Amino acid sequence: MEREKLLHLLKEGETDFVSLTRENRDILKDLIAIERDDPSAVKYSAEKAVRKISESSPELFLGLEGEVFSLIENENTFIRLGNIITCSNLAALGTNEIFGLLKEKYVPFLYSKSIAEFGNAAAGVPKIIAAFPSLERELVAALLDSEKRTFIHKGEPSEECRKAAAGKVSEVFIKICENSPCRSEMEVFARRNLTNTRSSARRKAEKLLKKLKG
């Protein structure tokens, strides 16, 4: 498809890019290129399209893994955050290459001092564990580390972000705890957060503890 036509479709915002890409995989390459290189706001529409494709058709990304993972290092915050989600969707491919890319480029975001980066990365953990169970202990350790981290918001340390991070961790543990080898660590974490002064985080800790007790 000609680039100008693709840009027009992105600006219209009405195209089903999942179906379109299944018919012509080259469109996915063009969408990734627009995300990476286009100076206009259309790159955000391209990012959303690529993310949507990754949700239902990760197999279309075979051969493009490196290009997508490079986007989580993009200087643009919105492109970076969106592609953290996209990269977790690619875990479903289950390949050695994806395993290596997740270890090298994705896991560091679980140690981010940005609550937005941490939150997006944490949300993808259940998908990664489903594809690569051997990573569970490493990923759980990274999530637990957030309790002692100093998150930065608007250039300043933020205790509220740390408390919010605990809620995001509880959400992940609720999803993965049933057959987890880390249940004891999760229970200790949940009990600690029963006194979290952020009410939403406290409720999630209560829900986690209830599920662990089963």
Image (cartoon, helix red, strand yellow):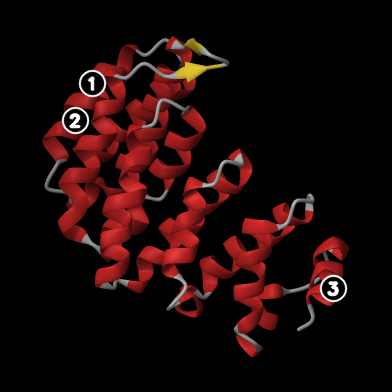
Determine the residue positioned at 35% across, 34% down: 169
Q: Quadrant of the N terminus?
A: bottom right
The residue mark sitting in front, 2 or 3, is 3
- Tag 1 or tag 3, which sits nearer the N-term? 3
Tell me the amino acid under the disc marked 3: Glu
Above/below status of 192 relative to 183 = above
- For residue 191, the mark is 1
Determine the residue positioned at 47% across, 13% down: 160
Determine the residue positioned at 15% across, 32% down: 185
Q: Quadrant of the C terminus?
A: top left
Q: Secondary structure at mark 2?
A: helix
- The residue where tag 2 is placed is 187
Are dots 1 and 2 in contact, CB under 8 Å?
Answer: yes
Above/below status of 132 relative to 195 = below
Measure the alpha-carbon separation of dots 3 and 1.
Answer: 56 Å
> Is residue 105 left or right of 53 when viewed as pictured?
left
Q: Secondary structure at mark 3?
A: helix
Tell me the amino acid under the disc marked 2: Glu
Who is closer to the viewer here, 9 or 145? 9
Tell me the amino acid under the disc marked 1: Arg
Q: Residues within 10 Å of mark 3 (few under 14, many from 20)?
A: few
Q: Position of residue 166 (x, y in %)?
A: 36, 25
Q: Position of residue 190 (x, y in %)?
A: 26, 26
Above/below status of 146 relative to 72 = above
Who is closer to the viewer here, 76 or 111? 76
- The residue where tag 3 is placed is 4
